[in-house]
Amino acid sequence: MNTAAERCPEGKNTFAFKSKGKHSVLAETLEQYLENISEDTFEDSAKKAEINIKEKDMLYYVKTVCPLCGKRFESPKVRSKYLRMTHMDNDYCKYYDSVNPLNYEVMVCSHCGFAYTEEIQKMRLSDEQRKTIKSRLEKLLPDRPPTDYSGVRNLDQAVETFLLALLALQGKPAQGSTKGMLYLKIAWLYRYKNNPAKESDYIEKALSSLVSAYNNEIFQEIQKELNITYLIAVLYFRTGRYYESARWLERILLNRHRPVHPIVSKQAGELWDEVRQMLRENNQQLKNRC
């Protein structure tokens, strides 16, 4: 029968019992191990679980019919009583003290993966468009069923739903303003994620679509035209192109219908003050260099 020394030869004994008692070495090992464990690990896990439970309870489900495959499914939405906005950025990006309804704006069919907003749902799909979209989804999801978005969604999942919605619009004569707002909302999601590079990418995409919308769409309501114009101005401002921002703000400030829409007029006036300040600072910097 092997002795204890033979079973734990020198150099292979994890706790190195050679000069210390077994229990004292084990205590030191446990102490070192415990120092490396965050004291908040279990507390944080419990908090996260509590947040998920609470957010789940804040949701309700709407019954809808997929415009692509025609099958019924339920999509989560946030109960209105839990919508408590804390503040809003100048490009209409909203912040909430609990659950953000933006995460649940897009409905994703649990059968075929087709994603759409209420605005996209109103668009009629031709047979050719249906065929094209189905082909795209089959290529995107060749060997797996559609991702389940029917429960609590995190920011990454929310981004995916908006990208899926954009996928459905590619090749379809959708309005540039529709695509522009989808791009902008993805930028907001990346802002929440503190990812400025991705946010900037999607702001540029939003700008391109919104400028195209302004130049090509016929707006039935002056309110929508003013809102689009303001968004273009504020996005140019947020990307540091102050002269472009000023040029678009002038379209609002000189619009004869502006007094009838005081909210966007006030926002444009406040932004105009900021733009003028930045232009003055830039001009002063140029003078100092000269």
Image (cartoon, rainbow, N blue to C red):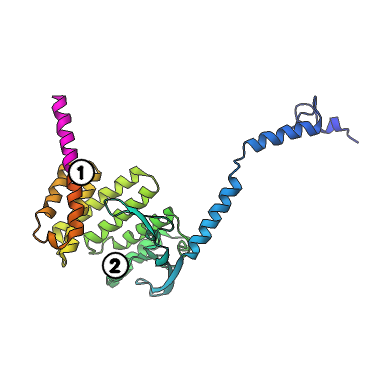
Label 1 vs label 2, nearer the camera: 1
Residue lying at 13% horizontally and 59% vertically, measured from the top left: 258
Q: Which residue is mark 2?
A: 119
* Secondary element type, mark 1: helix
* Picture coordinates of residue 207, whole percent (x, y): 23, 51
Q: Is residue 198 left or right of residue 240?
A: right
- Is residue 160 among the parts visible in the rendering? yes
In the displayed structure, 144 sits above or below 22; it is below
Badge 1: residue crowd in 10 Å (few <14, some 14–19, many ≥20): some
* Corner quadrant of residue 73: bottom left
* Camera-nearest residue between 91 and 218: 91
Please give the range of residues in magenta. Answer: 275-290
* Camera-nearest residue between 26 and 12: 26
* Picture coordinates of residue 181, whole percent (x, y): 27, 58
Dominant secondary structure of the residues highlighted in magenta in the image: helix
Is 77 magenta? The answer is: no
Q: Mark 2 belongs to which amino acid?
A: Glu
Residue lying at 45% horizontally and 66% vertically, measured from the top left: 59
Q: Quadrant of the C terminus?
A: top left
Residue lying at 56% horizontally and 48% vertically, measured from the top left: 44
